[in-house]
Amino acid sequence: MFFIENTKSWILLLLTIPIVVINYKTYINGFKALKILDPNMDTLIALGSGVSFFYSLFSLFFNTGHIYFETSGVILTVVQVGKLLESRTKNQASKTIKSLIDLSPKIAYTIVSGKTFEKPINEVKIGDIVLIRPGDRIPIDGEIKSTNKKNILIDESVLTGESAPLSKTAGDQVLAGTLNLGSDFIIKVTKLNQDTIFSQIINMVTNSIGSKPPIQRIADQVSKIFVPAVLLISLLSGFLWFFLPSDSKYNLTFAIMISVAVLVVSCPCALGLATPTAITVASGRAAKNGILFKSTAMLELLGKVNTIVFDKTGTLTQGRVMTYGEKDKLRPESISAISKLDQLGIKIILASGDNEKIVNEIAKDLNLSHYYSSLLPQDKFNIIKREQEQNNIVAFVGDGINDAPALSSADIGVTLRSATDVALDSADVIIMNNNLMDLVKSINISKLTLKRIKQNLFLSLIYNICLIPIAAGLLFAFGGPLLNPMLASIAMSLSSICVVLNSLR
Ligand SMILES: [Mg+2]
C-alpha cells in the first residue's frame, strides 16, 4: 500500500536522482564556497536543491509532509541550461603564445671560418657571427658587422608597432623578432636568446595568463548577501516557532519543517537564467554590429571599464605610412570616439612606441591629457599594471605584436580586425569593421547587459522573497496557509518566464 499511495513521489524521486548525480559539481563548488564563508551562486543552488531533495526523501519514507523533488530537479536543470547557453571559446591564451612562438626563429645561421652552420637559437652565444638573409626574421639581438648594400631596411613593427621600416647600417643594433626587408648582412650577437625583448614579450604574455583577476559576476555578488540572509531567516523562524507558541503541536519537528521550507523556497530557480539569457541576447546583438566578444563574461565587464589605454599606430591612426615624410593620419572617427568615451567618464591614456613629437601632436588633436611616448612593450604592460593597482578596471586597445603583453594583462583587451594575428589571439574583444565608434557601441551594449542582468536578478528573486514569509509561517500564524509544493512551482515558473521575456525585449 505504501508504494502504491506514493507512486507519483517515487517516480519523481527516480527522475530526480540522475539530475542530482549529473550536477554533483554544482554541489561540490557550492559547499566548498560556503565552507570558506564565501558563498556564490552555486552555494544557493546547492542549498536549495539539496535541502529540497533530502527533505522530500525524508517526507517520502516517514510520510510526514510535502514532496519537493521537482523543485530540486528543475533548479538544477535550469542552471545547466544557463551554463550551456553561456559556454563559449576558451584556451585563447595558449593560442597567443603559440602564435608568438611560431613567429620566433628557432635557428640562426652562424658563420665559423667562412662556413655557414644552422645552430639552435638557444645555443647561440654572445660574440657569435650570424648571417641574416633577405626576408628573414632576425633570430637574435646583435650589432651589424657588414652589409651587402650600404643601408638595409628593417621592419621593427613587431616590437614598436610602427609600420615604417627603418634604415640601418654597419654598427647599428638589430633586434630579435624584427624583419629584414633588404639584402644579406652579418651581425655579431650581443644578447642571449632569453634576454631579447622578443623573448620578454613571450614571457610577459605567458606570465599574465592566469594572473587576470577573476571576473566578479553579479549573480555571485548577489548570492554573497542573499545566502547568509536566507540562512539567518531560516534559523530564526525555526527558533521562533519552537519557543514562542505554547501549543505542544509546534514541537521540534514542526520548527525544523519551517526552517527547511524557508531554504526550499528561497532558492531562485531563475537565478541560473538571469545572466546567461541577458548575455546570449547581448552577444547576438554585438555580433550583428560587428563586435566579437570571445568570452561572454567580458560582456558583463566592459560596461564597468573606467580606464582605457590606447595604442597609437594602427589603432587611433590608420597606420599606413607609404613614403617617408608622409604623416600617419588619424582614423576618421578617432576624435569623435575619444570624445564619446570621455563623455562616459572614462579616463583615456595614449601609450605609444612612437617618438615624443608625433605623440604630442596626436594627443593634442585628440584633446588628451594623459599620454606617453617611446614606450617598449613592457612599458605599456607596466602602465596597465599601475592603473589596475589603483583599482581601476582597465581596457587596452591595440593592434601590434608588441601590444600582446598589454592586451593579455588588461582586464579587457580590445583589438581591430586589421590587427596582427598575435593581437587577434590575445584580445577579448575584436572590432570587425575597424571602426572605433564600435568600441563606444560595445561599451553601451555591455552597460545595457548589466542593467538587464540586474533586472533579471531582481525578477528571479522577488517571487522567492515574497514566498519566504509564507514559508516561515507568518501567514499561518494568523490562520493563513503554509508553503506547499504548488506555491513553490508557481514561483519557479513565473520567475523563469519573466526573466526570459525581460532578456528578449
Ligand atoms: Mg599599433
Image (cartoon, rainbow, N blue to C red):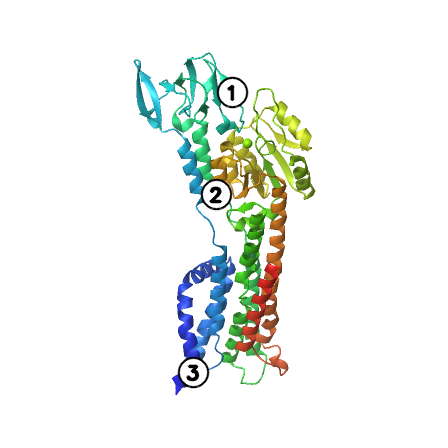
Residue pointed to by mark 3: 6
Residue pointed to by mark 1: 166
Q: Tell which tag, 1 or 2, sits nearer the viewer.
A: 1
Judged from the image, the quadrant occupied by ligand 1 is top right
Residue pointed to by mark 2: 211
Q: Position of residue 110 (x, y in %)?
A: 33, 20
Q: Position of residue 165 (x, y in %)?
A: 51, 22
Q: Measuring 57% from the left and 21% from the top, which residue is drawn there?
A: 323
Residue 343 seen in render = yes
| Amino acid at pointer 1 | Leu
Question: Is the residue 393 above or below the residue 68 in the image?
Answer: above
| Amino acid at pointer 2 | Ser
Q: Considering only order in the chain, which callout, 3 or 1, is on the residue closer to the N terminus?
A: 3
Q: Measuring 39% from the left and 66% from the top, which residue is drawn there?
A: 21
| Amino acid at pointer 3 | Asn
Residue 412 seen in render = no
Question: Is the residue 210 above or below the residue 44 in the image?
Answer: above
Residue nearest the viewer, comparing 52 with 74: 74
Image quarter where the N terminus lies is bottom left
Image quarter where the C terminus lies is bottom right
Q: Position of residue 86 (x, y in %)?
A: 50, 55
Q: Measuring 48% from the left and 43% from the top, which residue is drawn there?
A: 211
Do callouts 1 and 2 mark residues in contact (Cβ within 8 Å)? no
